[in-house]
Image (spheres, coloured by chain):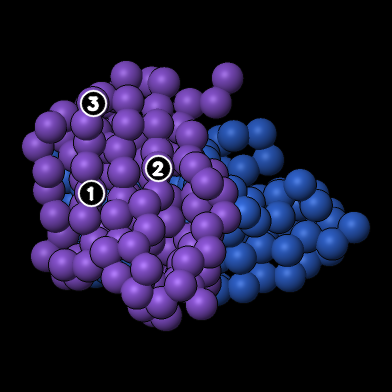
Chain colours: A purple, B blue
Amino acid sequence: DAMVIQNPRYQVTQFGKPVTLSCSQTLNHNVMYWYQQKSSQAPKLLFHYYDKDFNNEADTPDNFQSRRPNTSFCFLDIRSPGLGDAAMYLCATSRDIKGSDTQYFGPGTRLTVL
Amino acid sequence: TQLLEQSPQFLSIQEGENLTVYCNSSSVFSSLQWYRQEPGEGPVLLVTVVTGGEVKKLKRLTFQFGDARKDSSLHITAAQPGDTGLYLCAGAPNSGYSTLTFGKGTMLLVSP
């Protein structure tokens, strides 16, 4: 029944050790997004894919990369996590990217950096 | 960059009380969405408003989009503990290809 699935729900990594977060969707949506949400802050868009087209936000650090091997899956790679990268990472999908399109969010992955 | 300011940031009330939360901007949005996020979960869409002055009702929740499409409000009547969560507004700057700008949210705690 789940539509946007994120694995793992909780991820602990060490400072500087690469980590990959996973997102999958059963909605067959064209667009997939990755957001970073820190405590008491708004979700911050890192990047999105419209089909295979990758769109990086201007202020997303180079440390963050993403891959979308097919429609269903999207990955967030953090090459060298710092303490400041500890956050909730939310994956979302939408059918299209018009302003009124609903975004469907996964439950998030909470990343801890030791 | 278009910003959305939400107020209050935190609200703690008793069951049965009414409340209103606000989402304001100096910019015009083509549409505005309200999401609720429960602890440890992702946001879930409550409503989308697209027309200036539009009012939408979802059971005890009433959403209004300002006439100038720069602001919105969410009113909850007779709040229940199940309403507890983070309420986020998110706006789209235009009706074409655009991503959403999220506000910081209002954390609502409803105590029995």
Of residue A25 and residue A66, the one placed in the foreground of this image is A66
Q: Residue at x 71, y 49 (%)?
A: B83
**Residue A46 placed where, x, y %?**
25, 58
Q: Is tag 1's residue or tag 2's residue first in the polypeptide sequence? A: 2
User: Do callouts 1 and 2 mark residues in contact (Cβ within 8 Å)?
Assistant: no
Q: Amino acid at mark 1?
A: Ser
Residue A71 lies, with reference to residue A36, above or below; the image says above
Hey, which residue is sitting farthest right in the picture?
A: B112
For numbered disc 1, what is the local secondary structure? strand
Q: Chain of mark 2?
A: A
Residue that carries the numbered disc 2 in the rendered image: A22
A25 vs B84, nearest the viewer:
A25
Q: CA distance from mark 1 to mark 2?
A: 10 Å
Query: What residue appears at the point 76 percent right and 52 percent down from the top-left corner?
Result: B79
Which residue is label 3 attached to? A70
Chain identity of mark 1: A
The answer to whether the residue labelled 3 contacts the one labelled 1, judged by CB atoms less than 8 Å apart, is no
Picture coordinates of residue A95, whole percent (x, y): 28, 26
Find numbered disc 3 in the image and state the secondary structure of the residue it sits on.
Answer: loop
Q: Amino acid at mark 2?
A: Ser
**Mark 3 vs mark 1: same chain?**
yes
Residue matched to label 1: A66
Can I make out residue B110 in this image? yes
Structural distance between the alpha carbons of marks 2 and 3: 13 Å
